[in-house]
Image (spheres, rainbow, N blue to C red):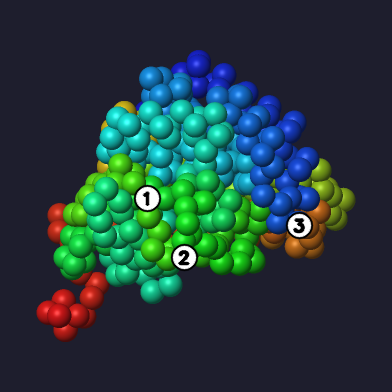
Amino acid sequence: MFGFDLSPEQKQLRELARQVAVEVYAPLAADWDLNRTPLPHDELKRLADLGFLGITTPEEYGGHGGSLLDALIVQEEIAKENRQAAFHVFESNVGPCRVLEFFGTEEQKKEYLPKVATGDLEMAIGISEPDAGSAATDMKTRARIEGDEIVINGNKRWISNGGASSHYLVYCRLNDEPGSKGIGAVIVPADAPGVSFGATEKLMGFRGIPSADIYFDDVRVPIGDLVVEAGGFSKLFGVFAIERLGNATMSLALAQAALDRTRRYVEERHQFGRPLIEFQNVQMTVATMAMQVEASRLLIYRAAVNAGAGLPNSYETSLAKCYANEMAKVVTDLGMQMHGGNGYTEEYGLERLHRDSHGWAIAGGTPAIQRVRIAADMFGRNFNQRPAEAIIK
């Protein structure tokens, strides 16, 4: 039996995040979305000063040493109002810097983690490539060791905050071993010679969260910036489970925002001489929305609480992400329907919630991939998705 309630400290943290979200970021959200405005630097520093960028960072590296759930609580409240601001809470607390926390050297932790917490450094993750999306182990970006340097060549695609972050944790091949056996990770500064960026993608949602290709042309970084050596792909994806819970929380926030707006609307809006909520069909719809939102929150909280200070369980994480991603698309769509024609306008913000919901369902491993992972964990074995002839080769 799983029961859960927030501690008094977590409730205070949630109230602070909610206040900042409503008073500071909600008024800016529509304009930032319309103009695809990235989070201004002074707003990044505001989040840092509030302590929101170092919630999970250990105290010895300038953070607060809080739990994963603490970070997700803050992220949800801000994401309900403004995804651009919430993304940076997401990236700093559940993103690639957590790989450094778990597997980085002491020098790497001292160099990078305090700067993430203060907003002086942003680190994005580079996994996907033009021909390696869901099949991540097909990646071709290579890194070779030459003396005390690592030389990187290749191309990464679909990099959230690409072109805007100061540093990137790049997953790459460090030897000729097939599949995941040769994959490790290296920190690459955005201003390293040989690093260049493609044009910013114009996406359906995620507006104001830059996404761009990264190109590496004989990029040289110190060998001290090698975080995970060849063969450490399973370690990398173990930490990636944390990011997937952050992804699920973004979906949860979108659905909760749609439910909150719909609840207000059906009480205020009158048709045929009475409030919309007086109609049984509306009652059934909002009840369905509420059930799905609450079920999603419990799946996310279970995985976060059970993780403790370690890594989340793969099965619980995949369940939470898959359900939340699909739930958000359904609930935001139902919210649009409950708003009628108003739901199809930009004024009420429902269409923005729905657009963003599709993006989070793609990022970090699609629901289809999560289902494969769920089945693998259920049966205690991996299911190879490749044709037999490809496996033989």
For residue 354, above or below residue 241: below
Amino acid type indicated by mark 2 = Tyr
Binning the other alpha carbons within 10 Å of mark 3 as few (below 14), some (14 to 19) or many (20 upward) gives few
* Tag in front: 2 or 1: 1
- In the image shown, does 366 or 66 lie closer to the viewer? 66
- In the image shown, does 151 or 161 lie closer to the viewer? 151
Rendered residue at 35%/35% (across/down): 108
Please provide percent x and percent y for residue 184.
27, 54
Viewed as shown, does residue 35 lie left or right of 92?
right
Q: Distance between the residues labelled 2 and 1?
A: 15 Å
Name the disc covering residue 221, or none.
1
Viewed as shown, does residue 15 lie left or right of 22?
left
Q: How many labels does the image show?
A: 3
Amino acid type indicated by mark 1 = Val
* Tag in front: 3 or 2: 2
Residue sticking out furthest to the left: 392
Rendered residue at 36%/32% (across/down): 109
Residue sticking out furthest to the bottom: 389
Provide the residue designation for mark 2: 215
